[in-house]
Amino acid sequence: MPTGIASGVGFAGAIVATILAVAVGSTHDPLWALVPLGVVTAGVASVTSWTGAVVTAWICWSLDSGFVLGREAQLTFSPAAGVAALTLVAVALAGGLVGRWVRMERTARVEPAGQPIQSANEAPDNFS
């Protein structure tokens, strides 16, 4: 997914995740807010570039800092905000690595000539 589109998807997903996190009361325990925000970050990071992954983590952190930790729509720079930032960046990197590994495995199943590898369930092409 192109970085610009992924950033937009990450922004929309982060808004929904933040609304859900606040609605279920994670302002009393801010670590629970990182669960839906981490899912959004990992999901977007797995299908985009490294830049899109880090931008999504930054957007998620901004919403977490401003609406879960700060509660006044202003960024909060506290130890909890630092933990949230490091957690979301780590999730973005892990999601990006998993996404790249899955894409690499998919392309490895195709031979260099562009012909798909024969499945074990198919009959062989020659019987020699």
Image (cartoon, rainbow, N blue to C red):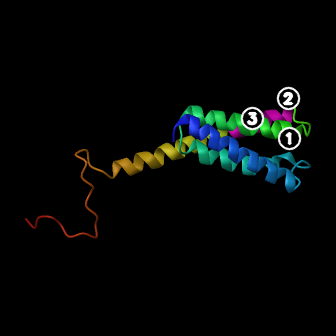
Q: Which mark is residue 85?
A: 3
Query: Residue flagged by tag 1: what amino acid is it?
Result: Phe
Which stretch is magenta?
A: 79-89
Quote the CA–CA distance across marks 3 and 1. Answer: 14 Å
Instruction: Select label 3 or label 1 by which is in front.
Output: 1
Query: At x 22% / y 46%, what residue is drawn?
Result: 113
Residue hosting label 1: 67
- Badge 3: how crowded within 10 Å, few (<14), some, or many (20+)? many
Residue hosting label 2: 77
Q: Main secondary structure of the magenta part?
A: helix
Locate residue 119, reporting x and y percent. Answer: 28, 64
Locate residue 101, reporting x and y percent. Answer: 47, 45
Direction from residue 128 to residue 103 in the image, left or right: right
Query: At x 25% / y 61%, what residue is drawn?
Result: 118
Query: Residue flagged by tag 2: what amino acid is it?
Result: Phe
Q: Which mark is residue 106?
A: none
Query: At x 18% / y 66%, what residue is drawn?
Result: 124
Pointer 2 or 1: first along the chain: 1
Locate residue 23, reporting x and y percent. Answer: 86, 55
- Badge 1: how crowded within 10 Å, few (<14), some, or many (20+)? many
| Magenta-colored stretch includes residue 46 | no
Would you say the residues marked 3 and 2 are in contact, meaning their CB atoms lie under 8 Å apart? no
Pointer 3 or 2: first along the chain: 2
Locate residue 75, reporting x and y percent. Answer: 84, 31
